[in-house]
Image (cartoon, rainbow, N blue to C red):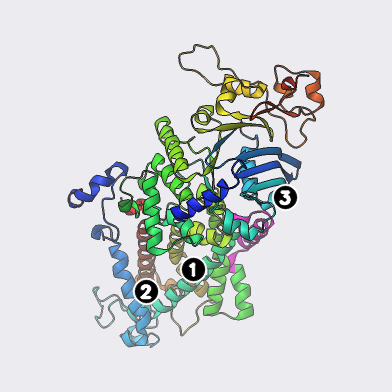
Amino acid sequence: MSHADIATARASTDAVRGAPMLDVRNLTTHLTLRRGVVRAVDGVDLHVHEGETLGVVGESGSGKSMTILSILRLLPRQTGARIGGSIVLDGQDLLQVSEKTMSEVYRGRKIAMISQDPLTSLNPVFTIGDQVGAPLRHHGIARGEAARRRVVEVLDSVRIPSPDARLNDYPHQFSGGMRQRVVTGMAIASAPRLLVADEPTSALDVTIQVQMMALFRKIQAQTGVGIILITHDLGVAASICHRVAVMYAGRIVETADVRTLYKRPAHPYTQALLNSIPHFGQKKERLFAIQGSPPSLIDPPAGCRFAARCPHRKPLCDDAYPPEVELESGHRVACWLASGT
Amino acid sequence: MADLTAAKTASAADSAIAGAPLRRRGAIAWGTLPWFALLVFPVLIVCALGGELLLPHDPNALDLGIAFLPPAWLDGGNWAYPLGTDNMGRDLLTRIMAGTRISLVVALYAILISGGIGTAAGMLAGYFGGRLDALIMRLVDIQMSIPSLALALVLAAVLGPGFETVVLVIVITYWTWYARIVRGEVMSLKQRDYVALARVAGCGTPTIFRRHLLPNLLNTLLVLATLQVGQVIIFEASLSFLGLGIQQPDVSWGLMLADARNYITNAWWAITMPGLAIMATCLASNLLGDWLRDRFDPKRRQL
C-alpha cells in the first residue's frame, strides 16, 4: 500500500471523526475445556482511535492475550471458544465477516501484530528481505522489484542501517533489538490500520526499549496506525500510551488517559499495581505485593473479582459486580468504592 | 579466514555491528567439501547406471576352478580378479558393481517413501494434535511393537520375496522413525512466534506447513535420511540373507554377505569386500548429509 492509499484511508476516517477506529463492546470469550467453561474474557469494552495507543495492562492470566486473539479470531479450535459481543473495525463487525475475509482482508493487512520474543519471531531459514516482503506478496500488495523497494523503505523506516545491503542476511545476524525492529517493519509493511503489540519490549534491554518506544511513536505519527500495547510493565505503558486499560480476571476494571491513571488511580487493583513498582533510591524492606491470587475463571465469584484480595473490601463487594462509573471524562472504573455506596 | 575478511573490508564495515558474514553467499569453501562422498558417489552412480557394459566378468558365471582366489595383491591372486573370487569362483569386483544398483535403488526408494509418509504423518500429528495425533501415534506404537523380521516373513509369504517386498518391509518399518521425530520437532516449531505471527498475518495451514515447518525440518530430515542409508542397506542384507529379499540371479551386497558368511575363516575377502562397499556407501552418505545440513543451516553456513 502506498502513502497515497494511507492518506485516502485516513481521509475516509476523518469523515467520521470522533468515532473510534476500533470499537470492542461487551466482548466475551468462553472456552470450553474438560474442567468446565472458562470465562477468559468476560464483557470487555475497549476502543482505539486513529493514531492512538491504548495500553492494556494486567497480570498473567488476566485475559489480555485472549482479548487480542479474540479480536483476530484466532483462538485454537480445540478450545471450543465462543466469542460474543461486537468488534467493530472501521465500521465492520469482525465477528460477522467470513473466515475467508478475515484472513484475506484483516489478518496481516488491516491488523498486524508484533509478538514478545524477537528471537523466535523470525523464521531462521529465510532471509529478512524475504520475510519482511512475505506479507506484501501474501496479500498481493506488491511483487518483485516493487516489493523489494517497499521492503527497503520499511526497513529504513524502522532504522535498520543500510537496509539494501542487509536484505539477504539471516535473522541470526541481527541483534535482539534489531530483530524486533525487523519484526516491526514486517508488521507495518502492509500499512495496517491497527497494530497489536504483545509485550514488544519485555525481552529487550532497557536502552533498546526506549528506542523501540521512540520508533512506535514515529511510525504512529507517520501512518496514523492505532496501537494496542499489551504489557505488564507500567513504566513502558506510561511512556508511550495515550490511554491505559487495566484488566483483571477477564474484565477491564479501570480505563483512563495515562496521566489520570497514574495520578489518580481509582480502583484498588490499579493502586496496588502502582504500589508494586520499585522506585529508585527508595529503601524498603520488601517490595509491596498484592496478597493472594486471581480467582479461577471457570466459576468466577458473583461479586467483584478483586474482592478477595482487596484491602477496602465491603460486604457489598461479594454480592454483586460493581457497575462501571465515569469519574471524569474518559476515566471509567468498576468499583463499589467509586460508586459512592 | 584472514584473507577472506580482508577481501570484504569494504562491505564488512557497514555490517560489522551485527557480525559480518565472512564469506559471500554462494562462494564455495573448498576445504569443507565432503571429498570422500564426492569421490564415492560418482563411482556408485556410474556402477548403478552402467549396468552390464562396465562389468569385467559375468556376475553369475560359475567356475569352481578359480573358487576362493584371494585379492590380486596377495599370494595366489590374479589381476583378472582384482578383489578375488567367492566360493563359486565368481568375481567379487563384478558382483559388487552389479549389486550397486539394487542396493542403491532399494535405499533410495525405501528412504524416499518412508520419509515421505513418516514426515507427512508426523507433521499432521504434531501440528493438529488431539485425536489425529493419538491415532497416528498409536499406529506408530503398534508398528514399533511388531518385529520387522517377523513382518517380513509374513509379507514374503503373502507377496513372495523380491525387490518390492524388501522396499515395502523397509518402508513399513522406518516410517515410524520419521513420524516420531518430525512430530516432536513440529510440536516445538509450532510454538515459535513466527508460526503464530504467520497465522496472525492470515497464512493458512498449507502455507505454514510449506514455509515454516518444512524448511525448518529439513536439517533433521537430511540427517535422518542419510543415517538411514546404511541401515537400509544392512536391513536389505538381512532380508536377503534370510532368503526373503533379493533373489538369485540378482545380486545385492546383502546377498553377497549372506553367501560368504560360511567361508569367513578361509576366505575373508569374500565377506570383507562387499562389507567395505557397504561401509564406504554409509560413510559417504553420512558425510554428505552432514555437509548438506551445514549448507542448509544459515547459522552454520557462515561459520
Determine which of the numbered discs, if any, sits on residue B111 in the image: 1
Q: Nearer the viewer, mark 3 or mark 2?
A: 3
Q: Residue furthest front?
A: A15
Q: Give the image quarter of residue A268.
A: top right
Q: Which residue is mark 3?
A: A80
What secondary structure is marked by label 2?
Answer: helix
What secondary structure is marked by label 3?
Answer: loop
* Coordinates of residue A188 in the picture (x, y in percent): 47, 49
The chain to which mark 3 is attached is: A
Give the magenta-colored segment's residue range: B125-149
Determine which of the numbered discs, if any, sits on residue B270 in the image: 2
* Coordinates of residue A245 in the picture (x, y in percent): 62, 32
Q: Nearer the viewer, mark 3 or mark 1?
A: 3
Q: Give the image quarter of residue B289.
A: bottom left
Label 3 Cα neighbours within 10 Å, binned few <14 / some 14-19 / many ≥20: few
**Residue visible at 48% across and 36% down?**
A201
